[in-house]
Image (cartoon, rainbow, N blue to C red):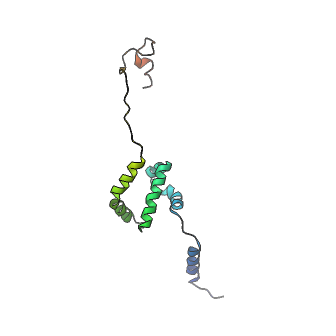
Amino acid sequence: MIWNPFKKKQEEKQSAQSTKKESIEERIEREIDSLPSMLKGKLKDPQIKKRFIEIAKRMEQDGVDFKSIRQMKKWMKQHEAELRAEGTADMPKVETVVHDGPRIGRNDPCPCGSGKKYKKCCGIDK
């Protein structure tokens, strides 16, 4: 038997060809632990995760190399306006809460009728 130094390289090429290409979802699931903690926490929300995957698929279609941060930033900058427009359509509108009725001060009598000041009665945890 003759030793062949190229045998290992040939085996690696064959094994790379035999494995199927991983989808974006599979890659994100696999690499989610290596992401910064801020992103990792946000990706627990299914809507945000879905949006993240959609953007990654669009980047892949445009030929962006995910190993190059420079290319990803460039793509994001080119598509910033349309990404913002798409993102705001999916998000629910936030409304300000407006309380009706009189404001209760800390030193006013408690509205529950106990006779104590609000700060010593119902407002103790606030």
Quarter of the view holding residue 116: top left
> Image quadrant for the C terminus?
top left
Residue visible at 42% across and 16% down in the picture:
111
Q: Can the viewer see residue 52 in this picture?
A: yes
| Residue 98 rendering spot, x and y as whole percentages | 36, 29
88 vs 44, left or right, is left
Write down the quadrant of residue 112 in the picture: top left
Vertical position of residue 11 compared to residue 84: above or below: below
Residue that extends furthest to the front in the rendered view of this protein:
89
Percent from the top left, x then y, of residue 88? Answer: 38, 49
Q: Residue furthest bottom?
A: 2
Q: Nearer the viewer, residue 72 or 67?
A: 72
Residue at x-position 46% and y-position 58%: 54
The residue depicted at 45 percent of the width and 18 percent of the height is 121
Residue in the foreground of this view, choosing between 41 and 25? 25
- Res. 35 visible in picture: no
Q: Position of residue 3 (x, y in %)?
A: 61, 86
